[in-house]
Image (cartoon, rainbow, N blue to C red):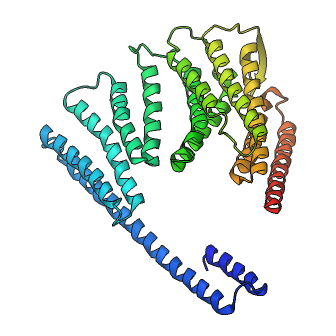
Amino acid sequence: MAPFLKRLDALLSTARERDLITEDSSSAVMELAREKERSHGLLNLTSVLGRLGALVAILGIILVVSANWAEISDGVKIAGLLTLLVLCHAAGFWLSSPDRDMPRSAEGLHFVGAGLVLAGIGLIAQIYNLNERPPNGVLLWLVAIVPLAVLLRSPSISLMSIFALLLWAHMEGAFPDSPLRMPRYQFTSHLVMEMNMGAAMVGLSPLLRRHEPEIARLLRVVGGVLLFASLYLMTFFRHFSDVESEGSVILQLGSFALGLAGLFIGRDALAPESSWYRHRLILLLSSVLFLGLAALAADMGWLPRGANLQFFNFGRNQTFDYAAILISLGAWFLWFVLAIWCVGFGTRSGRKGYLNAGVLGVGVGVLTLFFDLIGSLQSTGLTFLLGGLALLATGWGVERWRRRMLDAMGAKN
């Protein structure tokens, strides 16, 4: 029996014991649920086989075209791509009509059509030798699909637009002749830009919550992933910090302003369940942005780096300056505070996703710190033995903490 049917059977049994429903009504509801479950399974199987068949057919077309690519004229290549593009969007609109009502399939076709725009740009660039500046092709792709995301209100094309925006920013920042070229070989510049863009998405997502809930959820999830992944990498700042004063910081400062603006605009809509948690969240995310700005300033040579300190790390000596150490420590502090914020907010609002993310953040932080700092301790078997036991104890304690929180949330509901 499927999990849903098991839960429904248990619920109906409880309802019969409390005389809330008769035996005949219970049997009728259960039979209806079984019919729906069977039809749902058939529809899923049909959908999977249909998509698999479409994928195989597309791969076949690609292989046939690839085998005869040199013999196909340029005009036929362009006409074929435009035909595929039009057919994808036309079929998407046809499936989304009220008579057919297949929004997921329609969205998938529109997503393929948006991807074909990039393929078309690449095809034209190849035919007419326009490969001198690849960032321009990605920018043209971004400009072409953003209107689609807005008009179709498509979460998948919105995700593609976010990817195109980030890809263009990184490619433009790394292109040698670009006026926006970031300092060469400087990882911090790219990391700070990701961090700022993530904060902007998190801040702006609540504004779409009422009218476009799916796109709002997409912005919140993608922004949160970018923000937390960037903050996690920033904890290793002392390992990749590299002073490089030549290069533009327009993209970094522009994204920093966008991040602060997003947090300011969405300040009243973030964490609506509790003003206390909302104010702390805005303060924490703003602190993350300023920490990234400090890291950028240190690598650009605008902040004094301070004296060098030497550490023994996994059999060799490593030298870090005060600026790199302080920024790494600041990133670790904000990492743990944000994880604890997620635990508190998840418990307060009844959102298990935040609770699990916060507990995972604490566990990942403890595990990473152990391996990051073990090299500066006595490198012996006893150290690893004690450290391993400490990690096991930490994992056990974190899981018990998470389960207690979940039990408390269940009791509260």
- Is 75 left or right of 314, judged from the image as shown? left
Q: Is residue 226 visible?
A: no
Q: Residue 205: percent from the left, percent from the top?
A: 57, 40
Q: Residue at x 73, y 14 (%)?
A: 323
- Is 162 left or right of 336, judged from the image as shown? left
Quarter of the picture containing the C terminus is bottom right
- Vertically, is 56 above or below 381? below
Quarter of the picture containing the N terminus is bottom right
Q: Residue at x 32, y 38 (%)?
A: 118
Q: Residue 91: percent from the left, percent from the top?
A: 28, 57
Q: Residue at x 75, y 81 (%)?
A: 14
Q: Which one is in front, 280 or 167?
A: 280
- Vertically, is 343 above or below 168? below
Q: Which one is in front, 371 or 263?
A: 263
Q: Is residue 319 visible?
A: yes
Number of numbered callouts drawn: 0
- Image quarter of residue 239: top right
- Vertically, is 18 above or below 101? below
Residue at the limit of the structure toward the bottom, as seen here: 24
Q: Residue 126: percent from the left, percent from the top?
A: 23, 32
Q: Residue 20: percent from the left, percent from the top?
A: 73, 84
